[in-house]
């Protein structure tokens, strides 16, 4: 396996096309001139080529904490992956991941393509030839103390809009899996909802009032994506994960972690502070994508743990270095007030390979 840059990828595509033509021509050659043909091999060759086409996908921000894990899971399942990079630094990071072994070794191609996330045509060119797109990109605002300030909301919305519009105008793209967030679901009047599941949406006014910019950005971006998908007719699935954890997650994924945990004390009191391991989440992305051949539109909630005790909360605080602990007066006092968090829908897909906890 090796990372293929844009110019090299074009050469490889031409070479593969040439080999395919020669292979098809060989099927029609005869032992004695033109008499003995073996047409039965042709459909098999065509099926193989179609299978290769169906297994080509694109991942935005494939060098991110979640992105590289999705790439690894795709490679494990036989996909060829095109990774969107915005700058040379990302390309070098991708090469370092390959050398260090962080990127899974595979016979399939990992292709790095430079594209501008603020340019729909640039994205469409990058998506060309891919059957599916995984949009996982995260953004950092250097001016924001938390890494995700108010100004980042519109950036999040704009880039998601560009990605989904590029999917809509790219003929080869059939499906898109968008990574949203559980905080796009949980910030609402809990007195009117005793269960939070895939049908729930955060209240925009509550997010603004509490200055929950990460939640607001994910909420608005996901809604924009759904509007474009339904208007354009391409298939979209969104996954709303809890706080993404895993090895060294605070150093590997600082901006989303810090931003997600704003309001953590209130989520904890309501029974809505949940986490999910990055490897599990990556598997879920691939399974959701593969299920899209059977469904048109789907939304899922993902988590594998809900922080329920003071000890678990303190452990998370130590791991992140963020003071999210509550005082005893602010701790939960009545378990009957706890909102039920359900990921039953996603567990239906995961049940064959993972044990799911679908209610907390």
Image (tube, rainbow, N blue to C red):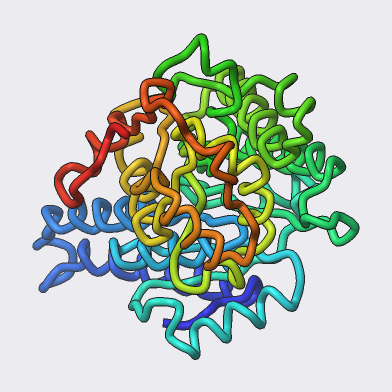
Across and down, in percent, residue 287 comes to: 31, 46
Across and down, in percent, residue 305 comes to: 36, 48
Q: Is residue 79 above or below residue 220?
A: below
The C terminus sits in image quarter:
top left
Residue in front for this viewpoint, 128 or 323: 323
Residue 301 falls left or right of residue 137: left
Is there any visible trace of residue 176 in the rendered image? Answer: no
Across and down, in percent, residue 340 comes to: 37, 26
The N terminus sits in image quarter:
bottom left
Residue occupying the point 63% across, 36% down: 164
Residue 120 falls left or right of residue 252: right
Identify the image quadrant of residue 72: bottom left
Residue occupying the point 54% across, 56% down: 59
Q: Is residue 208 above or below residue 140?
A: above
Residue occupying the point 24% across, 69% down: 26
Residue, far bottom: 99
Is there any visible trace of residue 215 in the rendered image? Answer: yes
Residue in front for this viewpoint, 1 or 8: 1
Residue in front for this viewpoint, 348 or 252: 252
Residue occupying the point 41% across, 52% down: 276
């Amino acid at each position: 396996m090796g990372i293929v840059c844009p110019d090299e990828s074009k050469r490889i595509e031409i070479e593969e096309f040439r080999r395919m033509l020669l292979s098809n021509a060989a099927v029609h050659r005869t032992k004695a001139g033109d008499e003995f043909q073996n047409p039965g091999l042709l459909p098999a060759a065509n099926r193989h080529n179609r299978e290769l086409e169906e297994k080509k996908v694109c991942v935005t921000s494939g060098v991110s904490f979640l992105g590289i894990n999705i790439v690894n899971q795709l490679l494990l399942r036989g996909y060829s992956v095109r990774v969107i990079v915005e700058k040379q630094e990302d390309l070098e990071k991708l090469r370092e991941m390959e050398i260090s072994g962080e990127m899974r070794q595979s016979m399939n191609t990992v292709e790095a393509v430079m594209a501008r996330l603020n340019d729909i045509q640039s994205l469409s060119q990058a998506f060309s030839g891919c059957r599916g797109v995984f949009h996982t990109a995260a953004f950092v605002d250097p001016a924001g103390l938390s890494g995700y300030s108010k100004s980042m909301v519109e950036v999040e919305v704009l880039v998601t809009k560009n990605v989904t519009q590029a999917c809509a105008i790219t003929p080869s793209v059939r499906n898109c899996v968008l990574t949203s967030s559980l905080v796009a679901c949980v910030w609402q009047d809990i007195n009117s909802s005793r269960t939070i599941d895939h049908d729930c949406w955060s209240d925009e006014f509550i997010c603004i009032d509490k200055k929950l910019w990460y939640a607001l950005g994910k909420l608005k971006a996901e809604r924009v994506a759904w509007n474009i998908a339904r208007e354009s007719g391409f298939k979209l699935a969104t996954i709303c994960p809890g706080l993404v954890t895993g090895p060294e997650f605070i150093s590997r994924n600082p901006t989303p972690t810090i931003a997600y945990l704003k309001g953590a004390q209130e989520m904890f009191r309501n029974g809505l502070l949940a986490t999910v391991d990055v490897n599990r989440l990556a598997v879920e992305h691939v399974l959701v994508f593969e299920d899209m051949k059977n469904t048109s539109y789907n939304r899922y909630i993902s988590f594998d743990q809900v922080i329920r005790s003071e000890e678990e909360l303190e452990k998370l605080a130590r791991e992140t270095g963020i003071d999210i602990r509550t005082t005893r007066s602010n701790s939960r006092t009545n378990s009957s007030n706890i909102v039920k968090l359900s990921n039953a829908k996603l567990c239906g897909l995961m049940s064959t390979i993972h044990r799911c906890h679908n209610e907390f």
